[in-house]
Amino acid sequence: MEQMNMGTQMPQAPEEKKSVGATVSIVVVVLVLAFGSYYFLKQVPTGSDVLTPSEIQADSAISSLSTQGTSTDLADIQKDLDATDLSGLDAGLSDIAI
């Protein structure tokens, strides 16, 4: 009979099985982050989406025109005409190429 030396022999650990669940969850997290960043970057305004100060001023002029009264009384119409600023009406004509 062979004599075994218990002190020098190390027991072998069973082979670890790799989990497929961890790999799948990592892939899912990466995909969610990718779609989230795509959606976020899609929402960020580009240079063409940002209004310039002249466009903001033009929008305020348009909104002031829409707040005029609807009365057909001559005095109310005269008040609306006096309140309307038409000084910059031809400001964009030079930008139009004919």
Image (cartoon, rainbow, N blue to C red):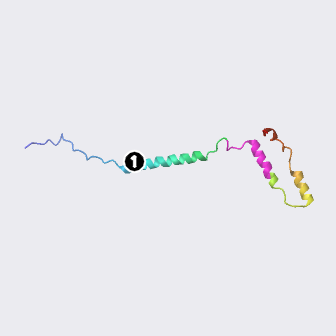
Q: Among all residues in the image, which is located at the extreme left?
A: 1
* Residue name at image x 51 percent, y 46 percent: 34
Q: Quadrant of residue 49?
A: top right
Magenta-tinted stretch? 48-63
Looking at the image, residue 34 lies above or below residue 68:
above
Residue 14 falls within the magenta-colored stretch: no
* Residue name at image x 71 percent, y 44 percent: 51
Residue 57 falls within the magenta-colored stretch: yes
* Residue name at image x 42 percent, y 50 percent: 25
Q: Nearer the viewer, residue 69 or 89?
A: 89
| Type of amino acid under label 1 | Thr
Q: Dot 1 corresponds to which residue?
A: 23
Going by the image, does 61 lie left or right of 6? right
Q: In the image, residue 59 lies at what x, y percent?
A: 76, 48
Going by the image, does 77 lie left or right of 31? right
Q: In the image, residue 85 lies at what x, y percent?
A: 86, 48
Q: In the image, residue 26 lies at what x, y percent?
A: 43, 47
Q: Residues within 10 Å of mark 1 (few under 14, many from 20)?
A: few
Q: In the image, residue 65 lies at what x, y percent?
A: 82, 52
Q: Nearer the viewer, residue 22 or 8?
A: 22
Quadrant where the image shows the N terminus: top left
Quadrant where the image shows the C terminus: top right
Looking at the image, residue 74 lies above or below residue 58:
below
* Residue name at image x 91 percent, y 55 percent: 78
Going by the image, does 68 lie left or right of 15? right
Say what secondary structure mark 1 lies in: helix
